[in-house]
Amino acid sequence: MTEYPVNCPFCWETFNFLLDPDQGSDRVTVDCEICCRAVAVTVQVDLQTGTVSVSADRESD
Ligand SMILES: [Zn+2]
């Protein structure tokens, strides 16, 4: 597991998100550690280069 920084779309603070990059691309909902709101985190893994990009959006519900 590796920690990746996530920029919260609600409070704009950065918190760390634990992820296993071997699982590939994924979309998960995590609670912001600062404001506790639900953040939809999209993980994109390039399996050829091992590059991981993490982006965060407001949960749309
Ligand atoms: Zn937040």
Image (cartoon, rainbow, N blue to C red):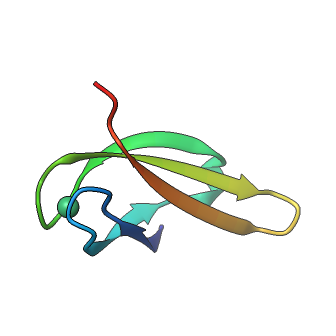
When the figure is inspected, residue 1 is found, relative to residue 60, above or below; the finding is below
- Which residue is depicted at the point 65% across and 65% down? 52
Judging depth in this view, the residue of 41 and 22 nearest the camera is 41
State the image coordinates of residue 41 (x, y, percent, origin top left): 43, 49
Q: Is residue 25 above or below residue 60?
A: below
Which quadrant holds the C terminus? top left
Depth check, front residue: 2 or 4: 4
Q: Position of residue 6 (x, y in %)?
A: 39, 67
Q: Quadrant of residue 36?
A: bottom left
Q: On the rendering, which quadrant does ligand 1 occupy?
A: bottom left
60 lies above or below 16: above
Q: Residue shown at 46%/72% (left/top)?
A: 4
Residue 8 % position (x, y): 30, 62
Q: Is residue 12 left or right of residue 50?
A: left
Q: Is residue 25 left or right of residue 14?
A: right
Q: Quadrant of residue 49?
A: bottom right
Q: Is residue 26 left or right of residue 14?
A: right
Residue at the image point whose x is 50% and y is 40% from the top: 27
